[in-house]
Image (cartoon, coloured by chain):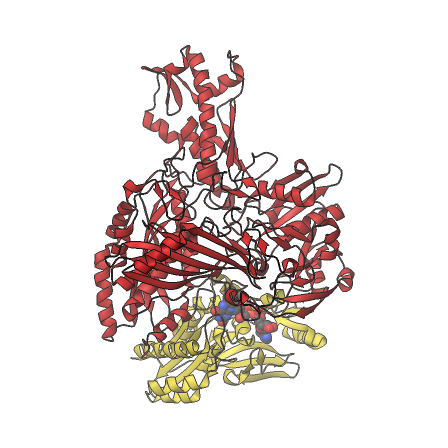
Amino acid sequence: MIPAGFEYHRPADIASAIALLQQHGDEARVIAGGHSLIPMMKLRMADLSHLVDLQGISGLSGITIGEGSVSIGAMTTQNALITDAALAEAVPILREAALQIADPQVRYLGTVGGNVANGDPGNDMPGLMQCLDATYTLVGPDGERQVAARDFYEAAYFTAREDEEILTAITIPIPAAKGYAYVKQKRKIGDYATAAAAVLLGEGFASVAMTNLADTPVHSDAASAALAEGDVEGCVREALQAIDPQEDMRGPIAFKKHVAGVILRRAITKAQERAA
Amino acid sequence: MKDEITPEDRVANLKGMGSSRKRVEDVRFTQGKGNYVDDIKLDGMLFGDFVRSPYAHARVKSVNKEAALAVPGVLAVLTAEDLEPLGLHWMPTLAGDKQMVLADGKVLFQGQEVAYVVATDRYAAADGVEAVVVEYEELPVVVDPFKALEPDAPILREDIKDRTEGAHGPVRHNNHIFTWEQGDKDATEAALAEADVVAEEMIYYHRTHPCPLETCGCVASMDKVTGKLTLWGTFQAPHAIRTVVSLISGIAEHNIRVISPDIGGGFGNKVGAYAGYVCSVVASIVTGKPVKWVEDRMENLMSTAFARDYWMKGRIAATKEGKITGLWCHTTADHGGFDACADPTKFPAGFMNICTGSYDIPTAYLAVDGVYTNKAPGGVAYRCSFRVTEAAYFIERMIEVLAIKLNMDAAELRRINFIRKDQFPYQSALGWEYDSGDYHTAWEKALDAVGYDALRAEQAQRLEDFKAGKTRKLIGIGLTHFTEIVGAGPVKNCDILGLGMFDSCEIRIHPTGSAIARLGTISQGQGHATTFAQIIASEIGLPADDITLEEGDTDTAPYGLGTYGSRSTPVAGAATAMAARKIRAKAQMIAAYLLEVHDDDVEWDVDRFAVKGAPERFKTMKEIAFAAYNQAIPGLEPGLEAVSYYDPPNMTYPFGAYICVMEIDVDTGETEVRSFYALDDCGTRINPMIIDGQIHGGATEGYAIAMGQEIAYDEMGNNKSATLMDFFLPTAWETPTYTTDFTVTPSPHHPIGAKGVGESPNVGSVPCFSNAVHDAFRPFGLVQSHMPHDHWRIWKIARDLGLHG
Ligand SMILES: Cc1cc2nc3c(=O)[nH]c(=O)nc-3n(C[C@H](O)[C@H](O)[C@H](O)COP(=O)(O)OP(=O)(O)OC[C@H]3O[C@@H](n4cnc5c(N)ncnc54)[C@H](O)[C@@H]3O)c2cc1C
């Protein structure tokens, strides 16, 4: 569990960070909280010669509550999502989900940007961001661009982010819907989801996404539409159509499909109670 | 001289037996000041690291060291070829087998040691490991012990192929290690044939791992000038390791000093000898420098000793009223690639023949077949005496299975079959003499404490609500009454590698009335420095706080067989009491001399000898200690010390009654332990607080094992659970809340009546948790479902029973 040797860089601004990524190409990777990347390096599954630490760049963290939206800096820790009262007021589902991620030690260091940029289907934030219809701000050599969370994930560890781009912020429209829930089944504290569901529910509106049930997060338009019409069974049916879980130590595929439905129903019930 | 304080105060001041004295070890542990193997840093120390096999069964065609040797800092790469001239490419196991130190032509399990890289630091060693190029040729893999015994199964151990005789008698297949039979086969089969009722079931106790928080490791330091080898390591049996190192390396035993420093949990994982120890010793001899080797978590889970993996086919016979008339068990034991079980020599399946449990079963028969497969070797006693957990799980499941067959309440079935108090000492059908017990009293106390009848009524109501669609949760009530066999053991039938399983204690009283005691055991978290001082305090009347306790340094401690199998208190604790009594006997003579009376005219009183009938004339132990060093007493040598080597006349038989209430979500398979009641009878209780701590810890391990912890392999022999993401270690969040209770039935043959307790909770809680799961589904027809009861497996029970609609 000892990583191969690497060079450590700590640039002071985004431009220098991007320059380092350009200079070293494949060999370089940014590091945020390190709580996904370092384990991979220790297992020698990620072999990188250059680590570009984002901790030294100011302005990358913080939560700003605007008129209709919330902006969260990429380097904001997952713990900050739990402790920010205004955020809990504006987008309470974020706090509910963050509380179910890993354990306090991981959340003190792990960042929101790292969680969504990582591309691990086990991460909880990507599905949640799809449910919330968030947008990611990416900055690269050619400037800045916005990518919808719903368009960002291509396959496990493959995203729309170019190697030389850095994710700087996440913008979340403040949901009008009052109903929300993030429900996650896991084996123990610190475990990734066996199945998790994010649900937003309001008058004639619904949004549904699921975590760790395919090689990307799964936001289903059909499931969301069915739920918006109050058709819970239809919603579950559509969501189960959209997922594609794999067997692992958490259980076989049939089990995961079954609990996906159970967890989604529970999330819907909870959201309905809150919406009422 | 008049004494101011009361006799009660004098007893309390000693903090002797019965006192919940705080653990003296915790001062350093809670401040991060422990001294573990990995804390040892020596000048010029080198580091070793292993190249391990990615395959479960393969021929090793070649090992190319070139690129590794080019890595800066890498000094050497050892392979079997390098060890062969020293005769160290293989080593003996504790079970009469031998094991490759480094792959000799082939590998037999994933994670097996292939080459050992020595470097100036850990990082260079790890880079060196990456750079070694090994060419493998894959061979067919066998992970199923039943398939391993089929006629056309691949031959795993080519080194001993075609043998007909193994270390424990005849073998009938290349992958067969031994058959061990106990009891009366014919009589048992007759009992089964004649019985009103026979229940039959396969009970599988899955493979798991002790997973101590500190992994295994060592530092070997060969001093070429003095010719002395010092070996620090995570050893549960430092003296035995010294003897083994001497025997296999040829270094004279007096030139070897083995030191077990603080150990961060052992649970059986640290009893055996590992390739890392041998390679580090060789590397230190070759380089003349100290060499450190410490496993990482994945290495620990993949390659050092696993536990359990017993397929136990059972038949239990009874009258229609529920009186058990016979028990039959055939076990297929998966030992992995080498037989490296840590059992006393004459017991290749440990004390599995305690499987008649707490019950008066007139006839029984047990046969165990040991089998080689392409899995890691081990089969150690994970917080239990040798295979006692397997035995307890087997009988406690068979009782439940029989209760189902008889349509009886399982608490009642136990009650009518318990060995009665007046039957002790009790001769079991499988050959043991149970020393003492009072099972009925413990059982009634436990059932009363949890309100058993009310619980059953609540459970029945819940079942009705479930059937009416009002809830999706069931309640399971898990019952267990276990009997352990610990404290190995009498030298006449217990040895490890020919070393009798006695243990020892040496006590030296200092002139000012404080003391140091050294034992042949070694604490790994049990709190020996606390409890053994309490035994001495009560025996010789010096405060426990004034007694230093040392273990683990073979140059200073008397020889002993170490700590595992709950043997420290039964064996070394007895030695401690006996050594203390020798001191007290001499102290009596000194006191009599000082008081100018005959030896028989003084009597012991808490912390002093007083003249019979004249209690105001006395000498305290402190005064006596000083006199031992400054008075010339006719007929007595100066000084006040004693040593005792204790060979126990019998094992001890702790027991307990555990009851668990569990809520089970049939849709997700999630469970919640609502309550867990643990009544333990470990005989005389030395430190109730430490006992409670042991119960909490062991029951939490039991919870993990029953509810999710496993070492799982796929068909290719890949270990699927080699990290703590998949290998379940409960956090504080998952850990149940425990209620502890006790009865006291002292051991009649132990000097202080103590029986040992550290392993009871693991032995007793596993069947208790498992029985709770089974009990919840009993109304729907569930008879047996194998552990671990993780979410998906519970979900599968519900699905198979049609509970998902
Ligand atoms: C024991 C344990 C349990 C865990 N359980 C959970 C869980 O239940 N749910 C969950 O969601 N997560 C879990 N995690 C993961 C944790 O939340 C990580 O912190 C998170 O996934 C990554 O955030 P980070 O800041 O640590 O990123 P890092 O590890 O530093 O980086 C992760 C990846 O994202 C890239 N990256 C990071 N920041 C940026 C950026 N701003 N722009 C572009 N690329 C970037 C990195 O290059 C790297 O490839 C767990 C982790 C551990 C160790």
Q: Which chain is yellow?
A: A
Identify which residue is drawn at 64% across, 79% down.
Answer: A163
Residue B765 percent across, percent down from the top left? 38, 55
Name the spot of residue B556 as percent of width and height, x first. Answer: 59, 34
- In the displayed structure, would residue B800 be above or below residue B32? below
Count of numbered marks: 0
The quarter of the picture where residue B257 lies is: top right
Chain colored red: B
Instruction: Say whether residue B731 is visible.
Output: no
Q: Is residue B156 left or right of residue B309?
A: right
Q: Dividing the picture into quarters, in which one does residue B329 lie?
A: bottom left
Residue B349 in picture, x, y percent from top left = 49, 52
Quadrant where the N terminus of chain A sits is bottom right
- Residue A136 visible (yes or no): yes
Q: Is residue A21 above or below residue B776?
A: below
Residue name at image x 73 percent, y 38 percent: B227
Looking at the figure, which quarter contains the C terminus of chain A? Answer: bottom left
Query: Residue at left 43%, top 46%?
Result: B758
Q: Position of residue B471 (x, y in %)?
A: 27, 72
**Image height check: is A149 above or below B714?**
below
Image: B804 above or below B91: below
Q: Nearer the viewer, residue B450 or B409?
A: B409
- Nearest the viewer among A147 and B678 is B678
State left or right for residue B273 relative to residue A78.
right
Most foreground residue, B179 or B646: B179
Front residue (pair B314, B590): B314
If the picture is divided into quarters, which one holds ligand 1? bottom right
